[in-house]
Image: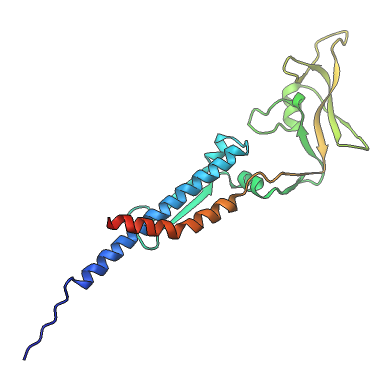
């Protein structure tokens, strides 16, 4: 006697189809979570007044780069991690050489290289010498003898009589600065992480419809 067992539908084919559906669902879920986290971080940065340029430093990448996998993952990072990290943690900043931090005042103007101007760059550009003024109460100062132009910046005075010449505070000198915490990146990262199971289920179900 010969017996033959046939299973209909084909369980092997069903399992293979289910694995394929799972790969699609996990890959799509991780892609959505990564893009969502990137958008959330960018919104935080612009909302904190830190500018579009810094916000656009947030990038995302999906793995695998092509195809679908049950082990799919998403990576979200910043191309300016030091700056973003500083605003996320609110660190205490001290001078590298143990002396003073020079904080430019409006009369200092801006750096040609972007960011804050340094005392050395200011002296080279303005052709003026900075003078240290110690104050027992409050921050000490670096000041310059000159005149203020129409932008409120200190420049060389050309007056032979000294008319319009002022002693302008150019930099505040402080031993350390506590950077305020302006971002909470972990909050959005936790939300993205918590959303993954629901996204997988939603994409799995959608793939069956």
Point out residue 81 in the picture as x, y percentages from the top left corner. Answer: 59, 47
Q: How is this picture coloured?
A: rainbow
For the view shown, which residue lies furthest in the right direction? 136
- Using the rendered view, name the quadrant where residue 134 is placed: top right
Point out residue 47 in the picture as x, y percentages from the top left corner. Answer: 59, 38
For the view shown, which residue lies furthest in the bottom direction? 1
Point out residue 1 in the picture as x, y percentages from the top left corner. Answer: 6, 91
Point out residue 59 in the picture as x, y percentages from the top left corner. Answer: 49, 45
In the depicted structure, whether residue 11 falls above or below residue 139:
below
Indicate left or right for 8 with 86 as reference. left
In the depicted structure, whether residue 66 falls above or below residue 9:
above
Q: Residue at x 50, y 58 (%)?
A: 194
Q: Residue at x 63, y 44 (%)?
A: 83
Indicate left or right for 55 with 112 as reference. left
- Residue 184 appears in the rendering: yes
Q: Residue at x 71, y 49 (%)?
A: 91
Q: Residue at x 52, y 39 (%)?
A: 56
Indicate left or right for 118 with 133 as reference. left
Indicate left or right for 206 with 55 as reference. left
Look at the image and tell me in which quarter the C terminus lies. Answer: bottom left
- Residue 68 appears in the rendering: no
Residue situated in front as seen by the camera: 163 or 186:
186
- Using the rendered view, name the quadrant where residue 70 is placed: bottom left
């Amino acid at each position: 006697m010969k017996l033959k067992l046939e299973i209909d539908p084909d369980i092997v084919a069903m399992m293979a189809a289910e694995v394929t559906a799972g790969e699609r669902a996990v890959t799509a879920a991780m892609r959505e979570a990564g893009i969502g986290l990137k958008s959330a971080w960018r919104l935080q940065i612009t909302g904190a007044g830190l500018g579009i340029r810094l916000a656009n430093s947030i990038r995302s990448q999906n793995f695998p780069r092509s195809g679908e996998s049950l082990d799919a993952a998403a990576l979200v990072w910043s191309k300016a991690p030091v700056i973003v990290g500083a605003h996320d943690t609110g660190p205490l900043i001290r001078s590298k050489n143990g002396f003073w931090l020079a904080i430019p005042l409006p009369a200092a103007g801006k750096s040609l290289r972007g960011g804050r101007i340094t005392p050395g760059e200011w002296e080279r550009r303005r052709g003026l010498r900075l003078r240290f003024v110690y104050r027992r109460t409050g921050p000490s100062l670096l000041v310059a003898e000159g005149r203020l132009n129409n932008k409120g910046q200190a420049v060389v005075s050309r007056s032979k009589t000294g008319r319009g010449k002022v002693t302008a505070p150019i930099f505040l000198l402080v031993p350390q600065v506590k950077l305020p915490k302006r971002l909470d990146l972990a909050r959005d990262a936790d939300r993205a992480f918590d959303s993954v199971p629901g996204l997988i289920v939603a994409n799995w179900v959608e793939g069956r419809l």
